[in-house]
Image (cartoon, rainbow, N blue to C red):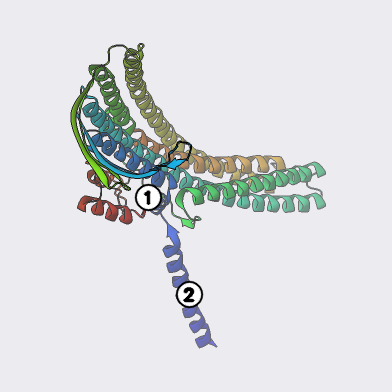
Amino acid sequence: MTKLKAQAKGWAAVLGVVVLSVQSLQAETLSDALIGAFNHSGLLEQNRALLRAADEDVAIATAALRPIVNFTGSLGRNLRRTGIAITDSSTSTAAVQISAELTIYDGGQSKFAIEEAKENVLATRARLLSLEQSVLLRAVRAYMNVRRTTETVALRQSNVRLITQELRAARDRFEVGEITRTDVALAEARLAAARSALAAAEGGLISAREEYRVSVGHNPGNLRAPKSLPNTANSVEKAKSIAVHNHPDMHAIQHDVSAADLRVMRADSAMRGTLKLKGGLGRSQNLGANTYANTGSVSLEANIPIYQGGRLSALHRQAMARRDATRSGLHITRHQIQQNVGNTFAQLRVSAASRDASQRQIRAATVAFRGVREEANVGSRTTLDVLNAEQELLDARSGLIGVQTDEFIAAYSALASMGLLTAKHLNLPVQQYDPAAYYKLVKDAPAKSAQGDKLNRVLRALGKN
């Protein structure tokens, strides 16, 4: 019998180790959630496609400086009937023509258009990085909120069990005449409120899990508590300096300003006219008479605007107005970034202070609750006193859960406000998207060539072809 007990204990120990190992394997870290969000996000995939579309604008602008060659072919039959006897003189004709056109001079419009498209590409890259920050920050919030609501549900369940015990004790004391029916009713009311709060917490957990699934791409498992806060700047002023020089929103608006300046130059150059070289070769043939004619032409065509009803001047003024608006946006963006840094660092300091205060509150509330309960056992405290002390302890524990969550969210929000909440800065083991790979292949406007074949391979690698 003793041997069987020893074997049972041994198997129990082995089973316990296996269970702990499985739980540890199923545990998910904040880093895992960030990796899942980065790989799962449809927003990132959508905006990567928009970036590739912006890359093509460079190719389109470049093509304006290339020769334009067109082929035209026609086959027709001319019907003609004349005279009283209705003489039929219908003929069949065929014609082919190749025409070519090359812009020699356009006042710099094409050159400015190419540079403007490049600035727009850089701005779109910066906005893609800004979106990456939003995706990762959303994952952090979802992760921490699942942990918050999970711990809140556990706390509310414990509260229901504790008040149930208090109610049972109150009824026993009422039976022996130590307390009145009022004390029992107070305990019953408090238990009903605790059950209502538990139901609300469980509903909050369902919502938090749904948000996690959408943000990260799968349902949350056993989420581990993050070990430490991410490193941020030592001071608010240093953080603001980093943000102004590093935040992708700042880079995006700077490129927008450059593009707006180039748009003004482009509108100004439109007033200078264009010079084009045109040429063509053609052949026409009368199929019935078997006669043909070959033609060829070469010409220089100058087009200089003299008066267009004020349209070009209006376009130039419009470009200048939009440039001024974009420059004002640069000023606004700089102040918004600095304000966001100040706000997030203030939230981080408040959360840290609140965490320390909540821990002290819990220690004091725990001592108070134990003391009140012991005093109630000897009749010097009422049931209401016990319930109030228990509620204060519950509020303190709930408050600690909230401020710990807020502290981590504030820390990662501070990183985002500085422009550092990126997969690269966090060293996430994910496949980084190279925004320049596609651009390098399309910037010279490739057609059917070896470069075009390389472009197809890139598209297949991206899973887009």
Check disc 2 and give the amino acid type: Leu
Task: Determine whether the residue tagged by mark 2 lies in a helix, strand or loop.
Answer: helix
In the rendered image, the vertical position of residue 447 relative to residue 124, given as above or below: below
* Label 1 residue SS: loop
Classed neighbour count for the residue bearing mark 1: other residues with Cα under 10 Å, few (<14), some (14–19), many (≥20): few
* Residue pointed to by mark 1: 227
Q: Residue 197, position in %: x, y?
A: 65, 44
Residue 18 visible at all: yes
Q: Residue at x 50, y 44 (%)?
A: 401
Of mark 2 and mark 1, the one earlier in the sequence is 2
Residue type for callout 1: Lys
Q: x, y (%) of residue 294?
A: 21, 40
Residue ID for mark 2: 15
Disc 2 to disc 1, how far (Cα)?
28 Å
**Residue beneath the point at 58% across and 40% down:** 395
* Occupied quadrant, residue 335: top left
Quadrant occupied by the C terminus: bottom left
Residue 419 visible? The answer is no
Q: Is residue 118 left or right of residue 362?
A: left
Name the one closer to the observer, 126 or 437.
437
**25 and 159: which one is in front?**
25
- Locate residue 215, reporting x and y percent: 47, 48
Mark 2 packing: few (<14 Cα in 10 Å), some, or many (20+)? few
- Along the viewing direction, whichever of 232 and 37 lies nearer the viewer: 37
Check if mark 2's residue and mark 1's residue have beta carbons within 8 Å.
no
**Residue sitting at x 45%, y 51%:** 216
Quarter that holds the N terminus: bottom right
Name the residue: 65% across, 51% down. 162
Q: Which mark is residue 255?
A: none
